[in-house]
Image (tube, grey):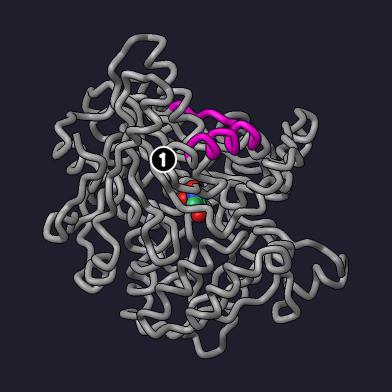
Amino acid sequence: MEYKIQLRESDMPKQWYNLAADLPTPPLPPLGPDGKPVSPQMLAPVFPMNIIEQEVSTQRWIDIPEEVLNILYQWRPAPLRRAVRLEKLLKTPARIYFKDESVSPAGSHKPNTAVAQAYYNKVAGIKRLTTETGAGQWGSALAFACALFGLECKVYMVRISFDQKPFRKLMMQVWGANCVASPSTETHAGRKILAETPDTPGSLGIAISEAIEAAVTDPTGQTRYSLGSVLNHVLLHQTIIGLEAKKQLQIAGEKLPDVVIGCAGGGSNFAGLAFPFTTDKINGAKIDIIPVEPAACPTMTRAPFVYDHGDTACMTPLLAMHSLGHAFVPAPIHAGGLRYHGMAPLVCQAIVEGLFAPRSYHQSKCYEAAMTWARTEGMICAPETSHAVAATIDEAIKAREEGKEKVILFSYSGHGLMDLSGYDKYMSGKLSDYELPEEVLQQCTKDLAKMPPAPMRKSGRW
Ligand SMILES: *Cc1c(COP(=O)(O)O)cnc(C)c1O
């Protein structure tokens, strides 16, 4: 038995896996303002053409450029670890493995796509990237990647986090990025909101609107926008997680996992681990694949499958996804990375197919799991990651009750060393749970009925 399974650099995957090639029913296309599918040219002011090509690609395997590999080698292949002490504590016959994405310089899975996106923009001649960030994990990942490629980076950080979470902002500044509080006075969208509500805490939707505006209005044409989750190309870049894990499980003497678990905000870390195993499920393997979300932001478990915008100001195309409505403002839970109103269209289409079994948890249960985790395995996980830990503990207990020797694999998406205030609240009994009231859900999704219909197409195999 080994505690960690390491791959050699020469065994790191050299191609990403694209689930769009294998889904029995393809996802519905993104729609423009006229209700027609968007053309690649319409996206050109926002993303460089090499990224747009990946976004619409249905090719199964896509080469990872040498320059990207050379940066990923800095911390990849990431270790696959076995949670031996947690298994003992739970007296479970299950073997629990986790893919440790906390070892990246920014401390989460997000640099996997940040590096690729910075590279593609650099080779397309772009000089500057704009983006939004909530709690700061994505902003810090992109700041890191831009520093290595010599790109300027501008981050619009949700006001409340900008004020309350100075450490991620400082990380961005160390890496040379320019981080401003959103709404800012630098964009039309920001000024408009400040005029209406000067003391607004801001939101991810507002920050996305600002970042897109800043990119498309740069008169030099050398600025583009970068998104940290949700879109197909982002999920693609994250599949290196699951591809590595597959090789590592084999080295550990395991065949396929019985259960695959990841927390899901926009869906990229979950998809990164799960998609390379989803192809096995499509080909007949029996695997329970579980994305986990907060009960306060129940996109996959309670929201309708609809066409909706990715941002509050309706600047993005319409995406076919489970959505709580683009105006939805989630309760202030600590898992900032899981407070998004929508979900990746590729993940949603697989949910519609019945390939995934999403579930939701309250944050108090997640912190309880995170405390158990820290006191057995010794690692302090991000509040987002605690959702995956909680589901893993539940599945390990279920395996014990069923008397089954299952293999459970989960994505350890990041460490929580910048997020200790949530632990503080939990330990001092000040943490509250928020159940989204049904009336609020109805209210937020009411207007989606006016959007073009999104038929739930499925093969009926699962
Ligand atoms: C951002 C983040 C998530 C959520 O990521 P998605 O890929 O959007 O689902 C999960 N865990 C950590 C540590 C994060 O930083």
Q: On screen, 74 above or below 8?
A: below
412 or 18: nearer the eye?
Answer: 412
- Along the horizontal axis of the image, is 105 left or right of 248? right
| Residue designated by label 1 | 377
Quarter placement of the C terminus: top left
Residue in view at x 28 percent, y 48 percent: 18
Q: What element carries label 1?
A: loop
From the top left corner, tell me how far across and down residue 121 is, in percent.
38, 76
Q: In which quarter of the image is residue 4?
A: top left
Q: In this view, does 188 lie to the left or right of 268?
A: right
* Left or right placement of residue 10 versus residue 455 in this view: left
Looking at this view, name the residue that lies furthest to the top: 402
Decide: is 376 above or below 167: above
Prevailing SS of the magenta stretch: helix
Specify few, some or many for label 1: CA neighbours under 10 Å numbering under 14, 14-19, or 20 or more: some
Q: Tell me which residue sits at (47%, 44%) in the image.
A: 345
Q: Give the farthest residue toward the bottom.
A: 220
Judge whether 201 appears above or below 457 on screen: below
Q: Where, quadrant-wise, is the N terminus in this rendering? A: top left
Amino acid type at mark 1:
Glu
Q: Where is residue 103 in the image (x, y as percent from the top left)?
A: 37, 58
Vertical arrangement, residue 303 with respect to residue 148, above or below: above
Numbered range of the magenta stretch: 357-373
Asked if residue 453 can be seen in this view, the reply is no
Query: What residue is drawn where x is 72% and y is 48%?
Result: 332
Q: From the Cβ of disc 1, is ligand 1 less than 8 Å away?
A: no
Residue 185 image position (x, y, % from top left) = 75, 79
Residue 170 % position (x, y): 58, 75
